[in-house]
Image (cartoon, rainbow, N blue to C red):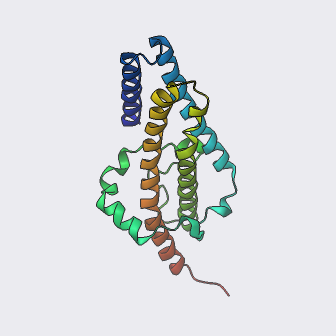
Amino acid sequence: MKLYLTVIGIAMLIISAVNIIFGTAAWYNVIILVVVCTALQFALDGLIAIIINKLPDKHFGAQNPLYNVSEFEKTLYKKIKVRSWKDKVWELGGLGGFSKKNLAKPNSPEYIEKFIIECNKGVLTHRLSYPIGFLPMLFIPGVCAFSVALPVATVNLFLNILPTLVLRYNTPKLKAMLKRMNKKIPQTV
């Protein structure tokens, strides 16, 4: 969380400084716009998370092919070494009632299935945040739409891509765990 807040704070300072230096607007208007755009990003991301969290779990289960991770993706995640930095990514699932920071019940198939559902909900939440983060540009007047709202939305995009990568990296491992567990459970006829 500290890393994310640092990135957001530094981005806000840089965006403000560049706009003040180039006289995009009065310095106090620039600062207000940067703060408002940043707060709007938090609000929009939070609203999306609340909406997705209310959707039925049945649409996000391990068997849903929309959330399958391709071999290409798995290779990409190895190349960019997601495993080495994934624990530094801000995980706010606990706010919705299910933390994905670590496995609390690694021997429970029901828990692993719920973990997969929460990962898939997280993926959809972050992916929807990519384009929605650019909506404030429509409401910011003049050049500030491009000099303030666009950079803030770009930082938001980057900060939403990272958790998406982590969630997509973890899901195949969780699915493999669930498959092994389900094989061990005796099937009743």
x and y percentages locating residue 114 in the rendered image: 58, 60
Image position, residue 22 (x, y; %): 38, 19
* Residue 55 image point, x, y percent: 69, 53
Q: Is residue 74 left or right of residue 108?
A: left
The x, y position of residue 14, in whole percent, is: 36, 25
Q: Quadrant of the C terminus?
A: bottom right
Does residue 133 appear left or right of residue 72 in this picture? Answer: right
| Towards the viewer: 60 or 147 | 147
Q: Is residue 4 above or below residue 98?
A: above
- Residue 88 sits in which quadrant? top left
Quarter location, residue 15: top left
Nearer to us in this view, 125 or 145 = 145
Q: Residue furthest front?
A: 142
Q: Residue at x 58, y 65 (%)?
A: 110
Q: In this orientation, does residue 62 appear? A: no
Quadrant placement of the N terminus: top left
Q: Would you identify the image quadrant in which residue 70 lies? A: bottom left
Q: Nearer the viewer, residue 36 or 87?
A: 36
Q: Is residue 72 visible?
A: yes
Q: Is residue 64 above or below residue 34?
A: below
Going 45% across and 19% down the picture, which residue do you hit?
24
